[in-house]
Image: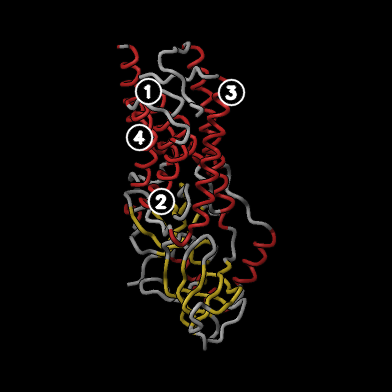
Amino acid sequence: MIREYFFLILSIIFVSLLLAFGSSLGLKVQNLLRGPYVALTPEVELKTLQARLEGYGEIKAVEAETVGRTVPVYSRYPFNFKNELLVASGENQGIKEGDSALFQGSLLGVVEKVFANSALVRTIFDTNFKTPVRVGTEGAEALLVGGNQPELELIPASARVENEDHAYSAAAGMPYGLRIGAVEHIRDANDKSYKEADLRVPYNPASLSEVVIVPKEQ
Amino acid sequence: MTYFVSHPERSEGSASRIRKFLAALLVLVLALAITFKMELFFGWSFDLIFAALVAFAALFGMAELIILVGLAVWIVQWQPVFAPELLVLLIVPVLVGVLQKLLPWRSTVTPAATLLLGILAFYAFARAPLGAHAWFLIGDILVSIACAYFILYVFRFTWGRKTVRRW
């Protein structure tokens, strides 16, 4: 009986030590079990290159990349509904809350929390992610709502928006005109006063191995 | 009604207990790997880790359970601060283990009820918009319950009813 209690106490001490001191090793195990990030398929790579050659948003994105800081992705939220990444730079490297995260020149998310040497990025694939954007050549206003399939909502019914139009950033604090993705599957919203559409990102979300952090604009 | 745990007075050999624990470790690693890979490729996954831990609560004593739960939480922890939803993952299986030790009855539906409430609590703590994804959540809960009972079935098939929980 005493031996069994001893085993129980030992197991509690062992687990407490694991949780308290071994977080980076835990992440290594997590990355080992997840396997390597998926490489881009040639089709996606071609689309990304084509997108880079188009329009103002792309020029802004390339500009933003040049002033940003490239940081590797440590880990990602392993359950549903949230889509967060932990990146390997934090307060000590000048990262601040509200900074934008870019992947291959497109807006991927916003820095949500900053730690000493790492930061948490909430991506556009998170169900709680919302940001105002502009769509198409006329710059129609819309609301980007995150999720496994990000959507553009509250597009005015009168706005001239077509499939393959670009959506780009228009939120305060975020560099204006960052490419986010292309519009597809435009449809009427339930109340017919607005339209909504799906957002197609020009990259494979499974291939996120490093991102560019761009400082928040004052 | 079928019980997944045997009478506590029937003892289990230490070699068998170690083999069972190692098998549980392998099941946990498999559940972790499948979850991470599904999340990577599809952006979603079933809650197989939670399902495995709830099944282990019906199979193991408190010491083994604490190690398995702690190991799972240690690996899925993805940021420097402890996320509130991971407390659910940590506490629920241990609480079930404690209650099964203290309460006189054992029910076949305990794992299913635990997973139903546990998964809802987990995503409520994660501040997920549950209503907007009700169908996905129902599917997730059903698959997780099926996974938990499959694990219980495999362990009972392999080790019979000598699945005594010890402190």
Q: Return the residue at label 4.
A: A19
User: In 3D space, how far apart are the residues under numbered discs 3 and 4 (Cα atoms)?
Assistant: 33 Å
Q: Viewer-proximal residue, B100 or A32?
A: B100
Q: Which amino acid, mark 3?
A: Phe
Q: Among all residues in the image, which is located at the extreme front? A: B1
Q: Which mark is residue B123?
A: 2
For label 2, count other residues whose C-alpha is less than 10 Å away and answer few (under 14), some (14-19) or many (20+): some
Q: Chain of mark 3?
A: B
Foreground mark, 2 or 3, reads: 3
Foreground mark, 2 or 4, reads: 2
Q: How is the image coloured?
A: secondary structure
The lab-note entry on whether marks 2 and 4 share a chain reads: no
Rendered residue at 36%/71% (across/down): A173
Q: Among all residues in the image, which is located at the extreme right? A: A42
Q: Return the residue at label 3.
A: B157
Q: Which amino acid, mark 4?
A: Leu
What SS does tag 3 mark?
helix
What SS does tag 2 mark?
helix
Judge whether A22 appears above or below A138 on screen: above
Say whether marks 3 and 4 touch (CB < 8 Å). no
What SS does tag 1 mark?
helix
Residue A12, visible in the rendered structure = yes
Which quarter of the image is occupied by the C terminus of chain A?
bottom left
What SS does tag 4 mark?
helix
Q: Could you tell which of marks 3 and 1 lies nearer the N-terminus?
A: 1
Q: Return the residue at label 1.
A: B63
- Residue A203 is situated, as x and y percent measured from the top left of the image, at 59, 62
